Image (cartoon, rainbow, N blue to C red):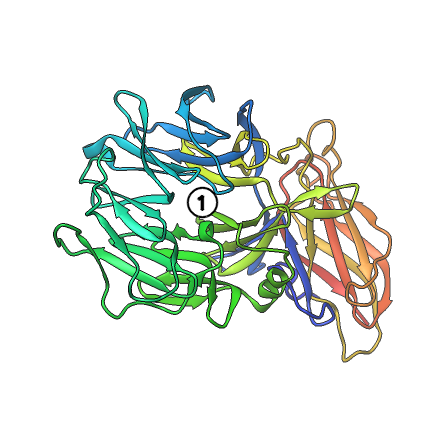
Amino acid sequence: MKYAGFCGPSYTAQSSIAAADRCMNWFVERMEIGGKVEYVLLPTPGLSQFSSAPEVPGRGLFTEPYSGRMFAVIGTTFYEIGADGTKTSRGTVAVDSNPATITTNGDGGGQLFITSGDTGYSYDLTTNTLATEITGAVMGAMLDGYFLALADSTLKISDLLDGTTWQVTQEAPRTAQPDPWRALIVNGPIIYLFGLETTDPWYNDGSSPFPFVPVEGATFPFGIAAPFSAMKLGTSVIWLAQTSDGTGIVVKAQGYQPKRISTHALEFAIKGYAHIDNAIAWTYSEQGHDFYVLNFPGIATWVYDDTTSLWHERGSFDSETGSYSSWGPQFHAYGYDKHLVLHADNGTIYEMGSGFYTDADGAYIRRERIPPALFNDNKYVRVPWFEVFHEPGLGLPTGQGSDPQFMLSWSPNGGKTWGNEISRSAGELGEYGKRARWTRCGRGRNMLPKLVVTDPINWPILGAFVERV
């Protein structure tokens, strides 16, 4: 029979006996035409070095859409990144523990606005000059030709199409609620100003001297737990939220109606992290999927696929500890017809793609799937055989991956303990009739398989078959 739910998301419940599902370095795709299977697992992208830097950390990456030029903040240096990966220093910036932000006022202004180290800078795209403009700036954005800066919990704006002029009359403190603003993001015509417990939408009504005003009656009761977790995805905004009643949920807002998109399993995982206020998010779209990547540095990386509304995990595997940590890329920009990501720890820019199978350290990506357990009213379940339904014959001509291997282990008790890994070939190059099948898999009251792969090939998984008695 088909193994129900074998291709599915990560969902490890507070009680692993209830659910211990894990989808690590795979994501779920739904077949749009029906057929043999409804869902498949596809491998998450790997990394290939595009441009390295002599300093750390990576702090920001941006493509200016009108000129196509790319810029990065790495350590204290503001770089321009060429199409061949060459770096040109365009000046130095202050540094603190926050990421940098970069935005543009477009073809009409010809400028960038950079925030870094509690300071706001303007950059002239014609003269290639960087200048300090304001202090206290935590992050920036642009709307209707005005640069926006969040500084000292106050919204400050530049003159129209002029990032070199910031007048003292062009400021607005928060007055609607007592909790201070911590973050801002622009989505369409709306500025979302996130407080600790509530969020204010603002817009441009043409007032003078300050053109932006709050949307009347639209403040909603979700603040932000991690200021740099707010990102646009399509027409929505997603962030790691908190309210007056608690913290650690992920919400999505389209307009003024936020809704929870995190699961109880994800929220339980977040609750166990030492701190979450330094979480950083980025987004990208590929192969018809829109991904929100939420990185808890050094701990874990969770990814929401807005196309399927499912969560999966990405991580770097430590062979010494036998555990995963967060995935290194923390900043993304699409430029030069590539998905480029900046690694937070080593300051290297990588091309990210499905044709790459290595992590930042050059190690092959380790992928892991733990599906729902085989269970029958707490009676013993015996598994005479198990088979992975995959696409065989994708091995490489030579070297590792020429005979790619599945590694399967079983837990008889819902993931409390695991047996030894047993390997089966996924098929050498052209071996299209190869089946990956295991017999005499054991018995238990809560039989749980764990499938692992590490070879550098494409790994589409269509499901599994199992006999249980």
Whether residue 249 is situated above or below residue 321 in the rendered picture: below
Identify which residue is drawn at 19% across, 40% down: 159
* Secondary structure beneath label 1: strand
Instruction: Please provide percent x and percent y for residue 86.
Output: 46, 19
Query: Is residue 81 or residue 185 the one in the foreground?
Result: 185
Residue receiving disc 1: 284
Q: Position of residue 91 (x, y in %)?
A: 40, 23
Amino acid type, mark 1: Tyr
Residue 75 appearing in the image: yes
Report which quarter residue 354 is drawn in.
top right
- For the C terminus, which image quadrant? bottom right
- Side of 156 where 448 appears, left or right: right
**Quadrant in which residue 122 is drawn:** top left
Q: Residue 154: x percent and y percent?
A: 31, 52
Estimate the x, y position of residue 146 in percent, counting from the top left. 22, 43
Observer-nearest of 89 and 157: 157
Does 278 sit left or right of 369 as displayed?
left
Residue at position x 39%, y 69% from top? 221
Residue 341 visible? The answer is: no
Q: In this image, 341 relative to 447: left or right?
A: left
Q: Nearer the viewer, residue 411 or 301?
A: 301
Crowd around label 1: few <14 · some 14–19 · many ≥20 (10 Å): some
